[in-house]
Image (cartoon, rainbow, N blue to C red):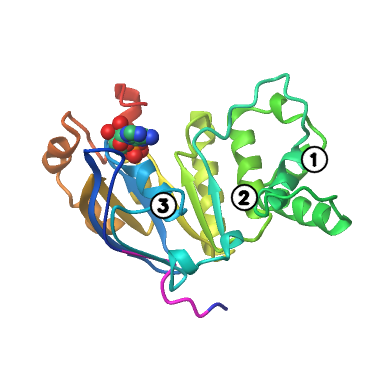
Amino acid sequence: MSTTKNILEMNQVSFKYDKEIVVKDITMTIKPGQFLGLVGPNGSGKSTLIKLMLGLLKPTRGEIRLFDKPIKHFRQWENIGFVSQKANSFNSGFPATVLEVVKMGLVSKTGMFRFFTKKDKEKAIEALKTVEMEKFLHHPIGELSGGQQQRVFIARALVSEPSFLILDEPTVGVDAKHVSDFYQLLRKLNKDKGITLLMVTHDIGTITEHASHVVCMNKTIHFHGHSDEYKEFSDEDLNQLYGHPVQQLSHNHAHEEGDRS
Ligand code: ADP
């Protein structure tokens, strides 16, 4: 087992693209084994926060540590998997097979092309087994449903065996009747594989049932704690934060009310 104390630490992190501060004074810690839901209205800075965590943006102020190291000295990027919101956008004509897409997860970390080995193929198959997609190995990715593609993208992120996985709205594109299976998969990754998860979501009605912790932000953090405590966050508090009625415990997801980017 790893002896990592904290997967991520942010200490008074702020960021502005130009004049306006979009992430303000964020202090938070993610511990190994947690499953966090990151929620907040559109434009509240969630994607920016993730880019800061991934080292894609540099904070205007404050410090970030990954796996107990200052981010500027951190090199084990294969330890962090990322499934972006725009991942599941292959159309039906896209020629790559599922296996090819998953193997790309081994290349993109180094940025260098290399020939794939037999071991790479085995790792890709293993990752596909984890997401229960191994029988689609030779299928063109574009022929799969949104939810199936999303599983393949998770396999692509898993192939380098990360211990921290960040997912940006992974349930978008997953058919409503498969969403609960999808959460089941995330729980399996968290509980059985011991992967720490951070998931951006609009599903504020569902996330508390699955995640161990919730971070609710709008530029700054409004809540960070156990999911059970988040359930106590009143609808009135949420309405004020979101600027429109949101019922966290109903299953009327915010995006069904038109809150989608
Ligand atoms: P969220 O993911 O919660 O929807 P974002 O992090 O995407 O929020 O955006 C936060 C704010 O930063 C928004 O006001 C958005 O318009 C602005 N923003 C996002 N990306 C850029 C960018 N590349 N340049 C300038 N402003 C940006």
Look at the numbered discs 1 and 2 and tell me whether their residues touch, using CB distance below 8 Å.
no
In the foreground, 164 or 10: 10
- Is residue 80 visible in the rendered structure shown here? yes
| Residue on which disc 2 sits | 157
Which residue is painted at 81% across and 50% down in the image?
114
Could you tell me which quadrant the C terminus lies in?
Answer: top left
User: In this rendering, is residue 44 above or below 163?
Assistant: above
Query: Whole-percent x and y of residue 21?
Result: 22, 43
Direction front: furthest residue: 18
Look at the numbered discs 2 and 3 and tell me whether their residues touch, using CB distance below 8 Å.
no
Q: Label 1 vs label 2: CA separation?
A: 16 Å
Q: Label 2 vs label 3: CA separation?
A: 21 Å
Q: Earlier in the sequence, mark 1 or mark 2?
A: 1
Q: Label 1 vs label 3: CA separation?
A: 29 Å
- Determine the main secondary structure of the stretch shown in magenta: loop
For ligand 1, give the image quadrant: top left
Which residue is painted at 42% across and 63% down in the image?
34
| Residue on which disc 3 sits | 210
- Please give left or right for residue 23 compared with residue 127 in the image: left
| Residue on which disc 1 sits | 137
Local SS, label 2: helix
The amino acid pointed to by label 1 is Leu
Label 2: few (<14), some or many (≥20) within 10 Å? many
User: In this rendering, is residue 213 above or below 243?
Assistant: below
